[in-house]
Image (cartoon, coloured by chain):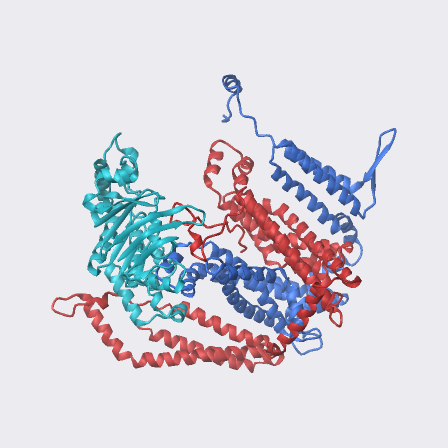
Amino acid sequence: MTAVAEPTTTTSSSTTTPQRPQPPKPPLRAYLGLVLIAVAAFAFFWWTREDTSVLFLPLGFTTLWAPQWPLIGFLVMLAVLGFCWFTRTGPMGALGALSVVIVTYWAGSNIYFLDRIVDVPGRLTGGNTRDQLIGYFNPDWQYLLFSNVAGTSRPIWGEWLITLCMAVVATIVGCFIGLLLAMAASPVSSPNKATSQTIKAANSVIRSIPDVAWALLFAVFIGSTAYGYGALAAVLALIMFNIGIVAKLLGESIDAIPLGPIEAADASGANLLQRDRVAVLPAVMPSFISYSLYVFELNIRASAALGVVGVAGIGGELSRQINRMSQGYENVGAILWALVLVVLLVDLLSLWIRRKLL
Amino acid sequence: MSYGYKIVVGLTGAVLVAAAAVLLTGAPASSTSDVFYRSMWGLAAGAGVVALGLAVYGLAYAATGKQRAQEAVRQSAGSTQRPGQYTPDRLDMRPVKPVKFWYNLALISVAVIFVSSAAGTGMELRAFLDMPARMWEFSTAMASGVFQVPDEELQSAWGSAFDAMLESVAIAWIGTLVGAVFSLPCGILAARNMSTLSVYIPMRFILSIIRAVPEIVFAVAIFIPLLGVGAAERGGAMAGAFALGISSIGTLSKLISEAIEGVDPGPLEASRASGATHAQMIRWAVLPQVLPEVLAIWLYRFEVNIRASAILGALGAGGIGRLISPPNGLFGQRPYPWEEIGITLFVIIVITMAVDQISAFVRHRVIHGKRVRQKKSRGGGGPARRGDPAGDPAPDEGGPKAAAVPV
Amino acid sequence: MIKFENVDVVYPNGFKGLDDVNLNISQGEFVAIIGLSGAGKSTLIRAVNGLVPYTAGVLTVGETVVDPKNKSKLRKLRSKVGMIFQQFNNVGRISVLNNVLIGRSAVTPTWRSLIGWYSEADKEVAFQSLERVGIVEKAYDRASSLSGGQQQRVAIARVLAQDPEVILADEPVASLDPPTARKVLGDLRRIQQDLGITCIVNMHHLDLARDYADRIIGMRAGQVVFDGRTEEATDAVIEDVYQRSLTAEDVASLDAPISLDDLPEGATVEDLEEAVAAAGDADGKR
C-alpha cells in the first residue's frame, strides 16, 4: 500500500545506475571552526560562572574535573553540532543552531534560570506567595468602584477614564505624526535619499528608547518633580511610542506598495506632495487604519503600565497599590482583573471597527 | 435624492449629544471626578461645533430646495425618454456623486472624541512653554555624560548600564524561547487547515484570552509571586522572562497559525493522497513551507520583547527598567544624575539597534536565502531606479515579505 | 514634434538601453515601436518624458529640450506628455474620477490636491475625458472594481485629462484579451486622430501594429533598425528586426484564449490569426 519502492526495484535500479548522488557533505573545516567556537564559549562560561559545583571524572590514575553547568552546556553544544553534521546541515544552519544554544546558556545563567525554577515549590508552600495568589484571585470590587485615590477626592473609576483619554489623544496625534514620518522615511515617497536615511535613523532611535524611559524623560522635561506628573508626560511618551511603531510598520507597507501608480502620477507631472497624496496615501490607508487600531490597543496596555513610573491614570494607582501591598492584595487584584476586562473590551471594539472598515 | 432627513437626524443627534454632555456635567458623578467633568465639557463643545456646522449646512440646503426640486423633475423627465419631450444631455449621463454619510459621520465622531479626550486628560499646554529650555539643558548634560572620558564614577555607570541592558536582552531571549516552544504546537492546533473544529475553537479562545491579558498582569499577578522580585539573583529577571514568554504565546501562535493557513495546499493534498499520517504531513509538507516565516516571527517577537522587558523592569522584574525607574533607579535620585542617565539611554539605543540589525539580517537571510540584501534602488530619485536592463515595466513583487505584521 | 538626435541611454549598471538613436516624429503621427523584449522599446518611450534620463545626445519634444536634471522643467514637460502603461497603473482604492484627476496634477495647486478639493474646471475636464473614452457612468466607482479594458480606458482618460500633445503608451494592450485590446486601441486611435495628438505605442503584437499605426519603428539592442510606413513593414523586414523567422508568438496575443500547442506543426501566421479570431468570437458570444 505504501508508495515506497520495493526493495527489489531499489537494488535493481542501483545496479543499473551505480552512480547515485550522495547527499552533499558539509565542509569539515567549517565544522571544526564551529567546534572551536563552542570551545571558546565553554571557556567563557567557565570563566564567568558563579555556580561553583564541579563534576569529577575519576580515571584511575588521575581525576578530571570540570565545572558542572559549563560542561553540560558544552556537551549540549557538541551534541547539537553532531546532530547537524549527521543531518548534513550547512555550516550556516549549524552556526545558527550553535548560537541559539550559546545565547540560551548565556541568557539562562544571566537570569538565574535554574536557581529560580528549583525555588518555585518552596515558594509555593511557604512564604506569602500563597496569600498573594489568593488575594489576586479574590479581587476587591468595592474598592475599584467606590473608593477614591488615596489622599484625594478623585474616584478610582475616573482614573480609568483618564487612561482611556490619554490613549485616544496619543493614538490620534502619534499615528498622524507617524504617517508623516513614514512617508518621509520610505524611499518610495520621500524627496531624496538623504532625507529618508536621516528620518529612518531618527526613527530607529525613537523606537529603541522604551516607553518607560520616554515617560520619565518627559516628566522631567515638563518640570514635574514628584509623583502625579499629570497626563501630559504620559501622552507625550505614548506619542513617541506610537510614532516609532507606526512609522516602522507603515514604512514597510509603503515600501511594498505597487510602483505603477507612482510612476503614472510622475508621468502626469505631479510633484512630490501630489504624488504622495494621490498614489501613496490611498494605497496604504487600510494598513494605516489597521495599525492605528493596533496602536490604540497597545496604548491602553502601555498607559496602564506607564503609571508605574508615576504618571496619571490607572497605572499610577496600580503602582501605589503595589507599594502598599502589605495591606492586602485584593486591591491590586481588582485593578488587574479590570485591566484585563478593559483591554478585552477595547480589543473587541477595534475588531468590530476593523470589520466595519476593511 | 433627499438628504434633508439625514441633515435633520445629524443635527438632532449632535444637539442631543451636546445637551446630554452639558447635563452630565451637573450629574453627581462629575462632582467626584474632574476627568469626567472636563471630558463632558469637551464633548459638549465638540458636539456643539458639529451641530453649528450642520445647522449652517442645513440652512443652505433648505435655501436651495426649489432649485433641487426643479433639477429632480428635469432628470426624472429625462430618464423616461419619451419622444418629443426633454432628452437628457451629456451632463445628465454623469453619475451623481455618492454621499459618504457614514464615512463623514465616523470622521466627525473621531474629531469630537479627540476634543473630548484632550479636554478629559486635563493636559496643560502651558507646560510646553518651559519645555524647550529644559530639554536643551538636560540634553546637553546627557550628551556631556556620553561624550567625555569616563572617570571612576561614570565608568561604573557604563558598566551597570551594560549589565542591565544585557540582562534585558537575556530576559527577552528566555521569554521568546518560552513563547517559541509553546507557540509552534499551539499555532498548529489553531490553524484551521491543520486541526479539527473541536480543537480549533477552544485553542483560538485560549489564545485570544492570552493575548488580551497584558504582560504586566502576568508579571505582577503570577510570576513575581512565584519567582521573586528585584535583582536578577532574587528572581526579578526570571519573573519578567516568564511573563514575556507567556504573553508571547498568544501573538506568536496567532501569527504562526496564520502563516500555516496561508501555505500552499498542494503539498498537503499530495502527502495526504500518498497516505501520510497527520504528523507526517505536518513534518514534511507544512513545516518546510512555514519554518522560515515562523523563525522570522520568533525573531520579530524577540525585538518586541526587548522593548517590553523595560516596562516590566519598572515593576521590579529585572532588566534596564529597574535601573532607570524610581524610586530606586536613576530617575529616583535628586538631583537627577543626567550624565548617568545619558549614558544609560545611549547604551539602550546602541544595544537595541544592534540587536535589531542582527535580527533583521537573520530574518532576511532566513526568508530570502543566501542572496544578500536586495538592492533597494527603486523609487525616490527616479533616475537610478530603472536599473533592469530588460526595461520591464512590471516592478519586482513586494520587496521583502512583511512576514510578521503584529495584529 | 519629437526629435531624437544621437540619443544614448546608459543605465547605472552599464547596460546600454539606447544606442545612438536618431528619430523624427511629426505632429499627429501614430507610431508603433516593435522589437524583442529588452530591445529598448520601453527605454525609448520613457526617455521622452524623462522617466529614464538619457545620457548623451539631444532629445526635443515640441520646442523644449528634455532635461532630466531639471525637475521643474521636467514636470512641465510631463504635463504635456501623457503616458499609458501596461498595468494601467490606476490607484485601485480611489474612485475613477479621482484617478482621472491625477492627470490634472500639474495644473492643480498642491494644496488643492492635498485635501482632495479639485476645482470645478478640473472636474469638468475629467468628466469630459471620461466621456471621450465612454465610461463616465463609472465615475464614482472604485477603480479596482473595473475590468481590465475599463481600467485601461480610465488610464487613457487620465492621460486625456492632461490635455496632452503627446501620448506615450508602453504595451498598452499586453494585459488585455484580444477583442478588448482591439477596442482599446481603436479608441486610442480615434481620440488621437480627433485631437491631433502624437502617439508613440510599444507593441508586442505585429498584427495590431499593422492595423493601427501610421508608422512602424523596429528596434534591436537599443538601435533603430527599421523606420518606415506601415506598408513598408513587410514580413521580411520584421524578420530582420527580430533576427529570426516570424513564429506564431510574434503575432499572437499573449493572453490569447488558444494555446499554441493546439496548432498543427508548421502553422503559419495566418492559421494563428484565424484561431485567435475564432476564439475571440467565442469569447464575445459567451
- Of residues A293 and B323, the one nearer the viewer is B323
- Left or right, B185 with respect to C168, comes to right
Name which quarter of the figure residue C207 lies in.
top left
Could you say where residue A39 lies in the image, as x and y percent from the top left? Answer: 74, 39
Q: Which chain is blue?
A: A
Above or below: residue C250 compared with residue B201: above
Residue drawn at 26 percent across, 45 percent down: C178
Front residue of this view, candidates A352 and C175: C175
Query: What is the count of numbered marks?
Result: 0
| Residue at point 26%, 38% (across, down) | C239
Residue at horizontal 51 percent and vertical 55 percent from the top: A252
- In this view, the residue farthest toward the left is B84
A303 vs A65, left or right, is: left
Quadrant of the frame with the C terminus of chain C = top left
User: Along the horizontal axis of the image, is B352 left or right of A297?
Assistant: right
Q: Position of residue B26 (x, y in %)?
A: 56, 83
Q: Who's cyan, chain-wise?
A: C
Residue B270 seen in this snapshot: yes
Q: x and y percent of residue C145 in the render?
A: 34, 56
What is chain B's hue in the picture?
red
Q: Is residue B304 left or right of residue C71?
A: right
Any part of residue A347 in sight: no
